[in-house]
Amino acid sequence: MLVTGFDIIFFWVARMMMLGLKFMGEVPFRDVYITGLILDEHGEKMSKSKGNVIDPLDIVDGIPLEALVAKRTAGLMQPQLAPAIERATRKQYPAGIAPHGTDALRFTFAALASPSRDIRFDLARVAGYRNFCNKLWNAARFVTMAVGESAPAAGGETQELSIADRWIRSRFGRLLDTLESAFRDYRFDYAASALYEFTWYDFCDWYLELTKPVLQGEGISAAARRGTQRTLVQVLEALQRALHPLMPFITEEIWQRVAPLAARTGESLMLQAYPLASDFGADEEAEREVAWIQAVVLGVRQIRGEMNISPARRIAVLFKDASAQDQACTARHRAWLERLAGLASVTVLPPGAAAPQSAAALVGTLTILVPMAGLIDAGAEAERLGRLLAKAQDELAKARARLANESFVHNAPAAVVTTERERATELERTASALSSQLERVRGLLAP
Amino acid sequence: MEKVYAPQAIERRIYERWESHGWFAPSGRGEPYCIMIPPPNVTGTLHMGHAFQHTLMDALTRYQRMRGRDVLWQPGTDHAGIATQMVVERQLNAQGVKRTDLTREAFLERVWQWKEQSGGTISAQMRRLGDSVDWSRDRFTMDPGLSRAVIEVFVRLHEEGLIYRGKRLVNWDPVLLTALSDLEVQAHEEDGQLWHLRYPLAAGAGHVVVATTRPETMLGDAAVAVNPGDTRYQPLIGKLVQLPLAERAIPIIADAYVDPAFGSGCLKVTPAHDFNDYEIGQRHHLPLINIFTPRATLADTVPERFRGLERFEARKRVVAELQAAGLVERVEKHRLAVPRGDRSGAVLEPYLTDQWYVKIAPLAGPAIAAVEQGRTRFVPEGWARTYFEWMRNIKDWCVSRQLWWGHRIRSIPGSPRRCGRFRRSAGRMPPRSSAGSIRAACWSPASTSSSSGSPA
């Protein structure tokens, strides 16, 4: 097949088709994937005269400011543009360009590869994906250290898979399904975002945390520990295979360490088989249960955020209107809830029981309550919220006045008016949220 | 594992290991899967667009390899003809040397040296990007094999009558002294002028007024055209006008191309210097009077006092003389699209030259069908529309250029029966065939065919 830009259809693709058919008797390629055009972050074509050219290897290896300026101002067809180019370069990259590594750049390109005609390249995204590489690396370190030298996948010893182990395997299987369609349809952007979300959220943010009580906790059976260790290495290993086409270097490096632990042999990751979705079947039950855990944890975190409760502070929660299923999950996953949500205790309220003054969050039909007594200084919090609300309302009034001013609306540039309108809407939202918050907190104050 | 992820510490080492083990070569097992790299031009280094495309190609290559297919990502570089020649010429100019100060051989030596340098940089960049191409199959568009293929294809097409030598108008760059394809032409709107000139009738009193943005080309006029439906001029069709300055008579003809609403409704027709006029000239069998030299100075076909003048200088003189003779009715400001070469920036001339063309229609048919039948598909599929539009309006392809850095094809005027039996001559010529003779295209100078189709 062929991967090329749309301008090449005329120069080259059509001529290859004609001559290929004529002399080889068949089409020279079955698929022609037409990429978008890379533009700078402002949507401008990259050109020497615009002074916005970046050498891709300078993003990989980094380049000091002076060298970058020199590169951009040397050999210009119109040398009189040099001073402006130098100024703009110094302004945009005061510290030059930092090294990002090849994999971060490659991943960025994949993430940007949507079917649109123009593709705006932004260096900030590469920095983001460099962080992604770090996150992957750290996850690999965690796994290799947690599992140690033993190869837990070897041998026929029994293993017990926790609901989290089953969950991550199921999630990985779904990722592989997505990747298969993405590669088939040339949707590199879907492939990149699916890999990112699985790695960052499912694997690192959630799964690694869920393994900690099993790996470190007391009273955990050897079989359970084994199950979690095996899942950790197996999924991490398979993840390197899944990521390899986009990020070949970091995955090869990690894989060399992880493969033996997952009982996989081979000289190189690039020669390995791509993971199959069929090896990671869907586990609906596990997905449901972990989704429940996530919703509860996120609900508690939301309350913490609204009530300004420190994450370090352990809190007691009540479950109101808990169904039988909720209660069963609570019983099974108490340890996780307490650990991930920072809970001192979880109490299921009997039906009809009265609840003390609490902040609430909903998980389906279940209500999570965090009793406020002694938890926050309601008076101080009310004051704080009151101040924020007053400020927001004040700014909102000003914005509204400006937008009601005929001469502003008619004379200011359209973009400025639009920005002001958006600002007003945002302030309305903020004021409204603060107002309800304040009411809730006031409700906690002694009558 | 190291505490910190340090890409610079691992990338080169890993790539060298992959390459040295030969793991980029096809495995020989499984269903074949091949991607051909759009060969980068050896004009410099890879840019962001390349890095973007290479990432996608490498992702597909690695993915398919891991899916068990027999995978080849075929690398190569493109000699890029005029672009590369200009890069090296600029380098020489910076040293105070002109290309024409050197022999062809010496100049080409310099270009091959540059090719090594640029090619080396490009492959180093590709290795850093992680491109899993099979380096053992690296090709260059001017390597012996591909050069042989170019000649072979040219000769075969010629033998089938699909290549012809034609005297046609091409986009001529008077600075680089070469023809350019339509695609190398950049036309931008610029400020110019529109002159309204009087051409007196040859017999009797009266005149017609023609409007032109290029007064100097009037010296090559072959006719004045009016729209057949234009009642103002119907009585004049078939009559002669006396062409000022050139002192010859040219006919008034009727052609539907003329827009009665533009200017006076009379169009001066200069078949050798305007693409549209050329078509009119073909339709009416008008003579082709070429008034320019290749450097766009006035040739010996014009009155002596204008010969040798640079074209825009000639314009001033022509206008001055016409004005003195009271033949300039008026001049007005006018925006027009000016074609410039995308490399030299010079204003291009539609110019009559002998060039080689490929008759495209017989080749386009199957190529259109292949996409219609889905044997080749575009992704996203909307681009097929672009392909069809272009393919259905395609013109014959001018494949010759006047360059030093490119494929040289030996063509021998003479009887076709003598083809294939010529001895190798000195210089960087294509390699011999096994019989010791070289493939060549034979053409008869008598048959400069004017086949259908016009240059692309």
Image (spheres, coloured by chain):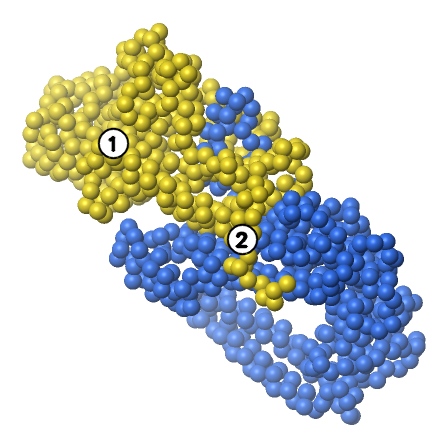
Chain colours: A blue, B yellow
**Which quadrant of the view contains residue A447?**
bottom right
What residue lies at 14% left-to-right and 23% top-to-bottom? B301
In front of the other: label 2 or label 1? Answer: 2
Most distant residue in the bottom direction: A447
- The residue that disc 2 covers is B13
Marks 2 and 1: same chain? Answer: yes
Up/down of B78 relative to A80, above or below: above
Q: Earlier in the sequence, mark 2 or mark 1?
A: 2
B91 left or right, relative to B58: left
Chain holding disc 2 = B
Q: Position of residue A54 (x, y in %)?
A: 42, 55
**Which quadrant of the view contains residue A131?**
bottom right
Kind of residue indicated by mark 1: Arg
Up/down of A379 relative to B175, above or below: below
Tell which of A170 and B318 is nearer to you. A170
Does residue B140 appear anywhere in the picture?
A: yes
Q: Position of residue B358 (x, y in %)?
A: 39, 22
Residue B454's label in the rendered image is none
What residue lies at 65% left-to-right and 89% top-to-bottom? A383
Mark 2–mark 1 CB contact (< 8 Å): no
Chain holding disc 1 = B
- The residue that disc 1 covers is B104
Disc 1 secondary structure class: helix
Q: Position of residue A379 (x, y in %)?
A: 70, 91
Does residue A108 appear anywhere in the picture?
A: no
